[in-house]
Image (cartoon, rainbow, N blue to C red):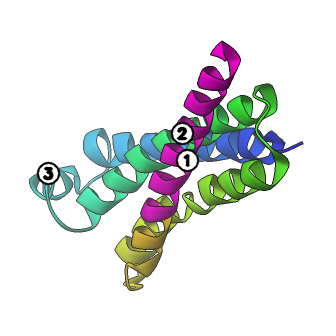
Amino acid sequence: MEGRKNVGWGFLFLGLFMASGFFLGYMHDIAPQKEQWIAQYASGTHFEIRMAHAHGGLFGLINIAAGLALLALPIPSPRARWISWLALAGLLMPIGILLHALFGVPPALVFVGGAAMVVATLWLGREALSLRRAARS
């Protein structure tokens, strides 16, 4: 059953990146160096952690939605499997952003994950629309 792992990993990523919001809130409101953190709002590590937070939550939600769609729609198994794995590979994007921000890892995972998520989303949309057309015939 394609989609179960997307739902599970999607919720885990959503929860983890929601929790990272507590770190961002701490750094903005409570940390001793909060003025410096606020001054770097649009640059550097602060900006990249915010980007990872936003994309991690969003990509978690996209995986949940894709997983539920794959479980509900009669998409042929080989195509559903590819869509599922591409959506999961999309989770590499927020991981890549964090690795780049914290450890200076080159941003290859960001681009690979982003491209995988775009392809998975467009492919799933195309599959859903083709099912609608087939139902009318």
Left-right relation of 82 to 121: right
Q: Give the image quarter of residue 101.
A: bottom left
Label 1: element kind:
helix
| Nearer the camera: disc 1 or disc 3 | 1
Q: Position of residue 54 (x, y in %)?
A: 39, 44
Which secondary structure type mostly characterizes the magenta part of the structure?
A: helix
Name the residue that disc number 3 marks.
35
| Residue 61, placed above or below residue 38 | above
Residue at x 62%, y 59% (from the top left corner): 86
The mark closer to the camera, 2 or 3, is 2
Amino acid type of the residue that numbered disc 3 sits on in the rendered structure: Glu
Q: Are marks 1 and 3 in contact (CB under 8 Å)?
A: no
Rendering coords of residue 23 (x, y %): 43, 48
Residue found at x 21% / y 68%: 44
Label 2 CA crowd tier, 10 Å (few <14, some 14–19, many 20+): few
Measured Cα–Cα span from mark 1 to mark 2: 5 Å
Look at 38% across and 85% down and name the residue there. Answer: 106
Say which residue appears at 62% left-offset and 47% top-offset. Answer: 13
Q: Which mark, by number, is residue 123?
A: 1
Kind of element beneath mark 3: helix
The residue tagged 2 is 126
Task: Give the mark, 2 or 3, whose residue is nearer the N terminus.
Answer: 3
Check disc 2 and report its element: helix, strand or loop: helix
> For residue 61, which numbered disc appears in the image?
none
> Of marks 1 and 3, which one's residue comes earlier in the chain?
3
Quadrant including the C terminus: top right
Residue 37 in magenta stretch = no
Q: CA distance from mark 1 to mark 3?
A: 45 Å
Q: Is residue 107 above or below residue 114?
A: below
| Image: magenta residue range | 114-137
List the single residue furthest toward the left. 39
Q: Is residue 120 magenta?
A: yes
